Amino acid sequence: MDKIRKLYPYLALIPIIGLALIPPINIGLEAPSPLITTWLILIAAFLGFYTLFIKTNLFVKIIAIGTFINCFFSRTPYLSFITYLSIVACCYFYIFCTRIENWKPIFKALQIVVLLNVVLILFQISGNDKLLNFGLPSINCYGTIGSCNQVGGLINSLTAILVLVSPFYLALPLFIGVVVKSMGTFFAGMLGLFVWLSQVKIKKIRIGVAALLLIFFIIMGIKQNDFKEGSGRTPVWKKTIQLANQHPIAGWGMGSYKYIMNSYMPTFRMAHNSSLQVLFEFGYPGLIFLIALFGILFYKLIKIKSMMCVSGLTILIADSMLHFPDRQIQVVLIIIAFLAYCTKELSHDRNLANRNM
């Protein structure tokens, strides 16, 4: 059994790295027959309910079962049930990651993903990439993904987990945010750095660095006209809340956002705010659940003084306020791996406390 456990990090890396390197291409998949679809949904539902008998986080059990029940109240039931397949897969990937003991192979592989993206971005913005710019102008093509928002989400998720290796990675989203002119990327990295600075004993250094970053952030926003009224994501946020209030209890349904919103604001396939998108798709109970999940995790990590985990979680929460990391196929498994690591930290602290009693 121990020999098999040693393979866990490498098995987890197969989907993590495979998805993290998906370029901006359209992949067309034929829908299976209704009978096959129903069969897959029933298998997923069985696995969802089976989490009741698995030793794992209570929130995972609620997600695995609650999202299935929510599908029956969806305004787009077919989309919701199809989306449920991926929800169950993510739940079991989290459960698998919490069984990993050796995280070094995962950290090393993700550092390579970071290096690869930085190298690509430097060649792309300098106009020297003639092959991997995916047919886009260099000014609009960044890293392995291409999109400014998406590469920001990827970099922030990678930073969140790699600060566990070294705090120097906190400079990564600041650098990339400036290079690709992404306020959201810079903002998330800045807040993560603020958390780390809280540990610096010399107060003048904390205040000085924080003030300089904040001033630079404001100047960057003014220069890019991101603070003007009606600019950026404000209109889609307002429309999202307005539509969410039409179905406040169960929402419009999981996976429905980009199809419903397309009738109102075709340019926005995502809400660019994970909390508001959860509100739209799951209603206010779903939003309360999300806040409780991350609020409790945040509190417990602070309580055990795992500040690097707190810094990483801060980056993810800040990024989710402006981007859509939970809807990004390249990013989701990286976030799940990070959350699993945080769970292991809490479990390790509990076990240590029990031994000392």
Image (tube, rainbow, N blue to C red):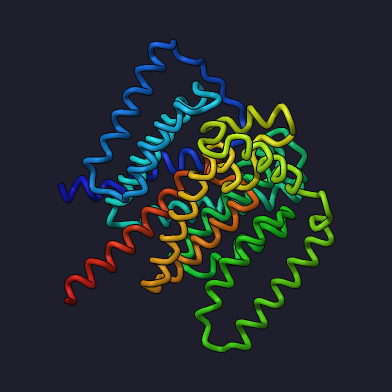
Quarter of the C terminus within the rendering: bottom left
Q: In this view, does 249 lie above or below 41?
A: below
Asked whether residue 165 is in view, the answer is no
Asked whether residue 315 is in view, the answer is yes
Name the spot of residue 329 as percent of width and height, x first: 52, 38
Q: Residue at x 84, y 60 (%)?
A: 223
Q: Which residue is drawn at 51% across and 28% down?
A: 74
Q: Is residue 274 above or below residue 46?
A: below
Q: 139 left or right of 330? A: right
Name the spot of residue 210 as percent of width and height, x first: 65, 76
Residue 43 found in image quarter: top left
Q: Nearer the viewer, residue 172 or 287?
A: 287
Q: 165 left or right of 182? A: left
Residue 343 found in image quarter: bottom left
Q: In this view, does 299 lie above or below 182?
A: below
Q: In this view, does 329 lie above or below 319?
A: above
Name the spot of residue 35 as percent of width and height, x first: 39, 11
Q: 152 left or right of 216? A: left
Q: Residue at x 45, y 63 (%)?
A: 298
Residue 150 found in image quarter: top right
Number of labelled discs?
Answer: 0
Q: Which residue is drawn at 53% across and 45% down?
A: 284
Q: Which of 207 and 264 is in front in this view?
A: 264
Name the spot of residue 155 as percent of width and height, x first: 58, 53
